[in-house]
Image (cartoon, rainbow, N blue to C red):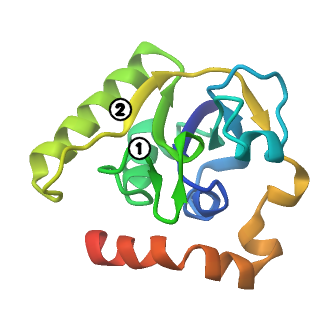
Amino acid sequence: MERAIFAGGCFWCMVQPFEEQDGILSVRSGYTGGYVVNPTYEQVCSKMTGHTEAVEIIFDESKISYADLVEIYWRQTDPTDAFGQFEDRGDNYRPVIFYFDEQQRKIAEQSKANLQASGRFNRPIVTTIEAAQPFYEAENDHQAFYRKNPKHYARSSAIRHHFLKENWS
């Protein structure tokens, strides 16, 4: 089993695209990159902990590669927006690929360079690539939110889905 952590705005919207892939063992919503141990949702939303909402993915590399996960990640975010994602604004929603080792770092950096060179976006790709830090699971209410609260999820993810359709279809 391998691990990956991606931040791309509201963690509610980052679960389903990964969870639906063969080889994914779990996708958990949580917080990373801050300085408060075991923060709560309210603390992270206050923007006082330094954390970013993220998803931790446990995957079977014999079925899906880290490079594949990075490609899926790009298709869930606006990689040109460093100040949040869609209607979610602030550092706690910034786009980040967190890496666990040198191989993951190289894959992420090459993928980012390829996306920039592709010309798909007319602004710079600003998603950061950073060393993984402790990951704290979010409260149970936030896990698999799209399944637990489909109507709320649909409302909260509408702007994201419109952007993705316009830019990745």
* Residue 108: image tag: 2
| Number of dots carrying numbers | 2
Please give the name of the residue rendered at 77% of the width and 73% of the height, measured from the top-left corner: 147
Q: Give how far across and how far down residue 153 sits, in percent.
A: 68, 75
Q: Report if the CB atoms under discs 2 and 1 are less than 8 Å apart.
A: yes
Give the crowd class for mark 1: few <14, some 14-19, many >=20 residues within 10 Å: some
Q: Give how far across and how far down residue 145 sits, in percent.
A: 76, 66
* Residue 26: image tag: none
Which quarter of the rendered picture does the C terminus lie within? Answer: bottom left
Apparent side of residue 118 relative to residue 56 in the rendered image (left or right): left
- Inter-mark Cα distance, 2 to 1: 7 Å
Q: Where is residue 49, by image quadrant?
A: top right
Q: Give how far across and how far down residue 54 sits, in percent.
A: 62, 43
Q: Nearer the viewer, residue 70 or 76?
A: 76
Q: Nearer the viewer, residue 64 or 161?
A: 161
Apparent side of residue 51 relative to residue 61 in the rendered image (left or right): right
Please give the name of the residue rendered at 57% of the width and 35% of the height, measured from the top-left corner: 4
Please give the name of the residue rendered at 65% of the width and 33% of the height, measured from the top-left corner: 51
Element type where label 2 sits in the image: helix
Look at the picture and state if 147 lies above or below 27. Answer: below
Amino acid found under the numbered disc labelled 1: Val
Q: Which residue is mark 1?
A: 70
Apparent side of residue 21 relative to residue 167 in the rendered image (left or right): right
Please give the name of the residue rendered at 80% of the width and 46% of the height, measured from the top-left corner: 41
Q: Give how far across and how far down residue 132 sits, in percent.
A: 57, 22
Look at the picture and state if 48 lies above or below 77. Answer: above
Which residue is farthest right?
A: 140
Amino acid found under the numbered disc labelled 2: Ala
Apparent side of residue 2 relative to residue 97 in the rendered image (left or right): right
Q: Earlier in the sequence, mark 2 or mark 1?
A: 1
Q: Nearer the viewer, residue 6 or 46?
A: 46
Element type where label 1 sits in the image: helix
